[in-house]
Amino acid sequence: MDFIFIEDLRVDANVGIYPRERVAPQSIEINLTFGVPDEAAKDDDIAKTIDYAVVISRIRTELGERHFNLLETLGEYVIALMLEEFKAPWVKISIAKIGVMKGVRRVGVQIERARE
């Protein structure tokens, strides 16, 4: 299996349970790795892989339209999108809130799932 990775994707998202987090979107950092069919490289054909530009656009759109209480829920949402809509066989995501607490650079979660 081949993999595509997207690192340090910054997205403004509505996520959090605290009142200060519900006032406005906050910047989050996403690192995403997902499996793609080996045939894409063999045939040099974008139609046989997952277009990372489309993935990035879709994530930004979806996260801009929803509110998530937990990063875990946001992560599961993105993973479901990758597995179901983009048909990725395997996905790993790391999501972090940036600078939400004094003296802490990032707070986040990592989730890994595969198609059944």
Image (spheres, rainbow, N blue to C red):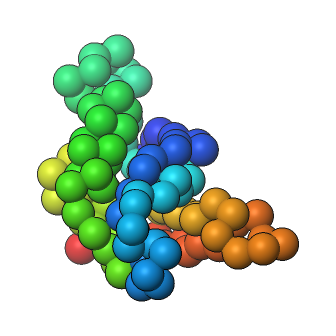
Which residue is painted at 76% across and 64% down in the image?
105
The percent position of residue 87, horizontal first and vertical second, equals 21, 51
Q: Quadrant of residue 106?
A: bottom right
Q: How many marks?
A: 0
What is the residue that sits farthest to the top in this orientation? 44
The percent position of residue 20, horizontal first and vertical second, equals 49, 75
The percent position of residue 77, horizontal first and vertical second, equals 28, 67
**In the image, 76: left or right of 107?**
left
Q: From the viewer's perspective, is residue 108 above or below residue 24?
A: below
What is the residue that sits farthest to the right in this orientation? 103
The percent position of residue 96, horizontal first and vertical second, equals 58, 64
Q: Nearest the camera: 112 or 16?
A: 16
Residue 79 in sight here: no
Q: From the viewer's perspective, is residue 10 above or below residue 115?
A: above
Q: Quadrant of residue 74?
A: bottom left
**In the image, 47: left or right of 91?**
left
Which residue is painted at 24% across and 29% down in the image?
48
- Location of the C terminus by quadrant is bottom left
Q: Quadrant of residue 46?
A: top left
Which residue is painted at 70% across and 75% down in the image?
101
**In the image, 46: left or right of 21?**
left
Q: Nearest the camera: 31 or 63?
A: 63
Q: From the viewer's perspective, is residue 1 above or below residue 107?
A: above
Q: Nearest the camera: 54 or 106?
A: 106
